Image: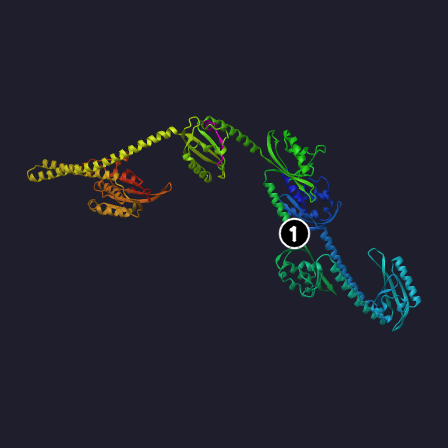
């Protein structure tokens, strides 16, 4: 998707915003000073104000010329230059728009994002409230002024000339009570005929002209005699502008009466002012209260405010902080005190006020307006107006969160996402691009964009059905790509209905399924090739579903069993298996299916042609996806009848041969013992008779004869040792040992004691420390290290005391721990090419005359190491020989 596509997606995502949003690009003059902005993007809310005009890439001041006059452009420029967010309210009058707006301008790189909120209704409410407060304060001052200065009598006539009201001064003048005077005409209240007729004419004139009339009259006072008065009759108009009563005021020109009248009127005016103020507060549609005194006691509160804070009229007369103690320390309470103490009005929208309405603390948001009450130049109280906007704020926040999630979802989707009007005539993707359609072919634009010509007729049918039935439209169809190739898409469009079940728009998405279609075709071709190949091989091949249900056999199966395809379904294999093996096959097969393990079993299957059973090797492996979930089973049955028959014969032969070999080994073992025992007897006789001959000829033999006798002794001893070696070697091969835990430190210590004389004679020394403990046959391990240490002493260099160093380390191989023991000496060593030969039986690398031995010692060492599951290797250098013995720490077998 290109840059234009992303701009269009951005536009549509923000079309649902409740406020106006504009994205502007900074414009600089030839002096590189920012002077205006180029319009990049408006959301639908903003476009509703400016009408259907082309706004993109136009100068912001051209679209909204008055922004220079009211300072809006200047504040936008300042925000773009400084990077400081601008947040202000302004009255906009121009281009047919007369509204109050709240602007927020945020710089983003070289862009300026402007959010516009229509606050006209809120401002009207605030202005109305302010005007009402001003009028009330002015009225109160007026009433106070009148009460303190006027000498007037006040009265009211109805249209039949009856008094409906008369103040106390007038009643005093008449000398009557209100009960005696109210509801009566002029004459009934003591007016003379001429006086009554004059006022009746004046009342008629006021009613006719709806204008006040003024006059002067003299008539007797009940107590003071005749007095002269100045009077005014004024019309009282109803809501339709018709006169419904006549109000009159009469001023006594007598000083004493003037003072009395002034006192009466003053008190009356105060009462009326307070009553009107209370009435105004009660009738105010916004929650309102009046606080008085330093303690800010609630003097008046309307029902809306009582409902908002969840209290009754019992709170009147109590300090506000006592009624709502949770306000203490909050921002809103600080502003209340500031208004009362400093007299500065406070207006703020969406103020956070945590408090308890229903016994549970929670956050509320209010539009607040506070005004001080001033009497005789002193602040005596204040008026508070609070409008609860919690639902609007929370709804806006939820909508913003929803929009952010929706925006993230759309941005993360690889699908083409779009919106269309109810009859599909205009298509818009979520980036805001609009494509007008041909009125004669209302579906052409969408079809041309997303449907290959081969599928258009089918698509039109589906779309018409979706519109008629108000249902979801779904279709897999080919698309013609920009490079001219043909791809596949899956389109799904959902109708959006209003509360009357009418379609207002369509919301849709198109997914590229070209790769899935290609894979399906490849799979289809692959399955066909698999079937062709499977039919060519001599084996029985089959496949199964994840639950073990067999869904395919190749031709070889049907040829062998004689079944027709799908004759028995999944269970077609059961009748072919030998009855003795059916239950075993079923049990093992379904165990493998449940555990996802490979299956392998030798079974007998019945041949339809010969009616005989033949042996088959039945194998199956699970085919898994990337998550390790089995998606299929693949199995084979291979005819092993000939091999099975031969194997059975071979097993009989092997068993017989094994028995024969065992008997032969026992005979050989017995022969070795007998031979070694019988061979020792003539050697002993040779030594005995040689010794007797030496004693018999004592002093009679010359030096040459003595030398020959010594050689006979040496040869006999060598023969005796060789016979013992053969016997020991045969015992090692024959005798089994039980493994125990052997401490090699103890083994070396015992060897050191046994070889004490040889070590003292050669001044030799054995160095070892912290050797491991391991499982083994203690006798054999003693023999192993005894032979190695004895060899190192025997093959020491002339005039060089033997030094034997034994060290060890632990290694791990294939999950098993081994001890690697190095035995190093400083002897004569051996040639590197002889490293392997020294472990061969009867192998001697040095002259038998120079070094004693049978040639069996190292071969015994190798046998012992191998019987323990280890090995031994040797190497030599100028400094001596090195033997490396590797032995497992733990034996796997019960016998060694």
- On the question of residue 765 being in view, the answer is yes
- Residue at the extreme left: 700
Q: Position of residue 149 (x, y in %)?
A: 81, 67
Quarter of the image containing the N terminus?
Answer: top right
506 vs 163: above or below = above
Say which quarter of the image contains residue 144. Answer: bottom right
Q: Position of residue 672 (x, y in %)?
A: 21, 36
Please tell me which residue lies in front, 595 or 246: 595
825 vs 253: above or below = above
Q: Where is residue 162 in the image (x, y as percent from the top left)?
A: 87, 64
Please tell me which residue lies in front, 573 or 484: 573
**Looking at the image, what colour scheme do you see?**
rainbow
Please tell me which residue lies in front, 37 or 618: 618
Q: Where is residue 875 in the image (x, y as percent from the top left)?
A: 29, 38
Residue at numbered disc 1: 393
- Residue at the extreme right: 194
Please state if 612 lies on the left or on the right of 235 as rendered: left
- Which residue shows up at 68% across the image and 65% down it? 314
Element type at mark 1? helix
- Which residue shows up at 8% across the image and 36% down it? 702
521 vs 432: above or below = above
Please tell me which residue lies in front, 473 or 259: 473
- On the question of residue 597 being in view, the answer is no
- Which residue shows up at 73% across the image and 54% down it? 125
The residue segment tinted magenta is: 548-559
Residue 509 falls within the magenta-colored stretch: no
């Amino acid at each position: 998707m290109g840059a234009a596509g992303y701009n269009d997606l951005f536009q549509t995502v923000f079309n649902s915003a409740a406020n106006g949003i504009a994205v502007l690009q900074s414009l600089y003059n030839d002096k590189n000073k920012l002077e205006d902005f180029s319009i990049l993007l408006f959301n639908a809310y903003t476009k509703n104000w400016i009408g259907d005009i082309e706004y993109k890439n136009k100068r912001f001041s051209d679209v909204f010329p008055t922004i220079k006059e009211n300072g809006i452009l200047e504040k936008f420029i300042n925000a773009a230059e400084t990077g400081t967010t601008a947040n202000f309210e302004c009255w906009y009058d121009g281009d047919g728009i007369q509204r109050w707006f709240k602007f927020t301008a945020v710089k983003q790189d070289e862009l300026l994002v402007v959010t516009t909120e229509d606050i006209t209704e809120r401002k009207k409410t605030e202005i109305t409230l302010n005007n009402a407060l001003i009028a009330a304060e002015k009225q109160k001052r007026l009433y106070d002024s009148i009460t303190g200065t006027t000498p007037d009598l006040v009265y009211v006539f109805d249209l039949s000339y009856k008094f409906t009201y008369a103040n106390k001064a007038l009643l005093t003048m008449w000398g009557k009570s209100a009960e005696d005077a109210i509801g009566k005409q002029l004459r009934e209240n003591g007016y003379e005929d001429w006086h009554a007729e004059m006022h009746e004419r004046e009342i008629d004139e006021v009613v006719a002209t709806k204008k006040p009339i003024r006059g002067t009259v003299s008539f007797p006072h009940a107590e003071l005699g005749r007095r002269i008065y100045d009077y005014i009759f004024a019309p009282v108009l109803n809501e339709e502008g018709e006169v419904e009563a006549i109000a009159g005021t009469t001023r006594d020109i007598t000083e004493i009466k003037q003072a009395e009248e002034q006192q009466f009127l003053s008190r009356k005016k105060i009462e009326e002012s307070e009553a009107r103020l209370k009435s105004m507060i009660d009738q105010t549609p916004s929650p309102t209260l009046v606080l008085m005194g330093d303690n800010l006691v609630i003097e008046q509160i309307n029902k809306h405010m009582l409902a908002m804070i969840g209290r009754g009229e019992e709170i009147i007369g109590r300090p506000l902080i006592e009624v709502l103690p949770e306000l203490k320390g909050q921002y809103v309470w600080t502003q209340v005190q500031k208004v009362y103490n400093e007299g500065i009005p406070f207006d703020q929208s969406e103020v956070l006020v945590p408090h308890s309405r229903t016994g549970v603390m929670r956050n509320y948001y209010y539009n607040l307006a506070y005004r001080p009450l001033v009497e005789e130049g002193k602040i005596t109280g204040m008026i508070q107006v609070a409008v609860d906007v919690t639902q609007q704020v929370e709804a806006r926040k939820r909508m913003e969160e929803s929009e952010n999630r929706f925006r993230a979802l759309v941005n993360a989707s690889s699908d083409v996402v779009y919106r269309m009007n109810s009859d599909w005539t205009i298509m818009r993707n979520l980036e805001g691009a609009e494509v007008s359609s041909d009125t004669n072919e209302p579906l052409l634009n969408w079809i041309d964009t997303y449907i290959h010509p081969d599928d258009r007729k089918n698509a039109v049918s589906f779309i018409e059905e979706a519109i008629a039935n108000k249902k979801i439209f779904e279709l897999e169809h080919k698309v013609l790509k920009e490079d001219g190739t043909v791809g596949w898409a899956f389109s799904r469009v959902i109708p959006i209905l209003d509360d009357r079940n009418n379609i207002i728009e369509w919301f849709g998405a198109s997914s590229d399924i070209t790769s899935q279609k290609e894979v399906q075709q490849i799979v289809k071709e692959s399955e066909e090739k698999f079937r062709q190949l499977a039919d060519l091989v001599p084996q029985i091949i089959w496949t199964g579903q994840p639950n073990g249900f067999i869904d395919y056999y190749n031709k070889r199966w049907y040829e062998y069993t004689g079944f027709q395809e799908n004759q028995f379904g999944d269970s077609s294999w059961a009748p072919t298996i030998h009855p003795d093996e059916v239950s075993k096959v079923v049990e093992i097969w379904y165990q493998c299916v449940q555990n996802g393990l490979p299956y392998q079993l030798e079974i007998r299957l019945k041949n339809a042609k010969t009616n005989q059973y033949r042996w088959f090797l039945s194998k199956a492996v699970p085919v898994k996806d990337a998550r390790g979930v089995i998606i299929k089973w693949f199995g084979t049955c291979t005819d092993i009848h000939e091999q099975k028959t031969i194997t059975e014969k071979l097993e009989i032969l092997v068993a017989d041969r094994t028995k024969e070999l065992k008997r032969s080994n026992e005979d050989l073992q017995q022969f070795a013992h007998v031979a070694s025992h019988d061979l020792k007897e003539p050697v002993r006789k040779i030594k005995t008779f040689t010794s007797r001959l030496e004693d018999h000829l004592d002093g009679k033999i010359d030096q040459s004869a003595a030398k020959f006798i010594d050689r006979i002794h040496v040869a006999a001893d060598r023969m005796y040792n060789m016979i013992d070696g053969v016997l020991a070697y045969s015992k090692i091969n024959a005798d089994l040992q039980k493994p125990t835990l052997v401490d090699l430190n103890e083994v070396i210590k015992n060897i050191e004691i046994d070889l004490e004389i040889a070590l003292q004679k050669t001044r030799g020394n054995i160095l070892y420390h912290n050797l491991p403990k391991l499982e083994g046959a203690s006798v054999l391990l003693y023999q192993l290290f005894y032979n190695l240490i004895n060899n190192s002493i025997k093959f020491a260099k002339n005039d060089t005391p033997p030094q034997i160093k034994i060290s060890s380390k632990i290694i791990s191989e294939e999950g098993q721990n081994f001890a690697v023991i190095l035995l190093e000496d400083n002897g004569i060593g051996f040639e590197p090419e002889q490293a392997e030969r020294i472990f061969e039986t009867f192998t001697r690398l040095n002259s038998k005359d120079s070094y004693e031995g049978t040639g069996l010692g190292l071969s015994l060492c190798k046998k012992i190491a191998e019987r323990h599951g280890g090995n031994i290797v040797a190497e030599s250098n100028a400094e001596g020989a090195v033997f490396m013995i590797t032995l497992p720490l733990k034996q796997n077998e019960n016998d060694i």
